[in-house]
Amino acid sequence: MISPREIRSSLSAVLTQSLVLITGTSQTAYAFAKQASAIPDQVLLRHAIEHVFRIRMFRRLDALATKMLRDIDPEVRDLWAAYARSEAVHDRYFLRDLSAAGIDRDTVDSTPPFSATSRLVSFLELSSRQQGALPIILYSFWAELNSEVGSSAVIARSQRLFGADAARGALAHRNLDAHLDHAGTICRILSAVIRNEDELLTAAHLLRIISLFIGEYFAELDAWSRCNSSYSPAFGSQEPKLHEA
Ligand SMILES: [Fe+2]
């Protein structure tokens, strides 16, 4: 068995490499990771809208993973099921924040998701048919580890731009992640799913592919921001600090 700690250390190294690439090529990714004070208001709101879409799209995938985990230790399966149930309803947090910032639900619902988000979901669905729940759980690894380190500065930026009400949901989401140790939970689940070094290599490969889709999302957000704001933060080649090994 590979321990949750080893899983975390090994896959975090992959995340770090991937984030260097993403933040080195995308202005918006750089700002979210390194310079939250420079994130423009419109970009922050558009990113929150995509968060709503991602939560909605992942409901089905997370439920699929729950079914696929039926052969796993019941305690681990229940851990995932509880995690998935909790995440599934958090779109309402972000919808409330958006509403407080002046973006109503109709506007959210009439906004098309970015293509990279839809393609990420399609990839995870297809790959999970071949590899079981692992690809879907790895996306949660990506999300939870980044939330752990990256989200506080972004929440502070929302509070400054739009007021406390417009960040209340994001803050509640972040606090739940921390209080329930979602990152640790996902590492425990991965430790039950990844049974040997070969499977750890497969997981690392899948995580790199997931990171490519995230990179494409930020490239789309860059293009969107060029059309929707006069946004040009300084961005350089510092190491991103979205998570720790
Ligand atoms: Fe979470």
Image (tube, rainbow, N blue to C red):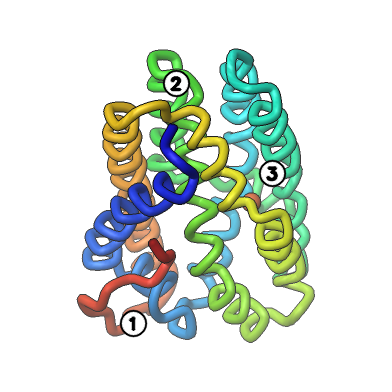
Secondary element under disc 3, as helix, strand or loop, is: helix
Image location of residue 166, percent across then percent down = 73, 72
Secondary element under disc 1, as helix, strand or loop, is: loop
Q: Nearer the viewer, residue 139 or 229?
A: 139
Of mark 2 and mark 3, the one earlier in the sequence is 3
Image: 125 above or below 120: above
- Circle 3 packing at 10 Å, graded few (<14), some (14-19), many (20+), is some
Q: Mark 2 near mark 3, Cβ–Cβ under 8 Å? A: no
Residue 221 figure quarter: bottom left
Q: Nearer the viewer, residue 232 or 61?
A: 61
From mark 2 to mark 1, how far is it between C-alphas?
Answer: 38 Å
Q: Label for residue 170?
A: none
Q: Residue at x 29, y 43 (%)?
A: 208
Q: Amino acid at mark 1?
A: Pro
Asked if ligand 1 lies within 8 A of label 3, the reply is yes
Quarter occupied by the C terminus: bottom left
Please indicate, yes or no, whether residue 103 appears anywhere in the rendered image: no
- Residue at which label 3 appears: 87
- Residue at which label 1 appears: 233
- Residue at which label 2 appears: 128
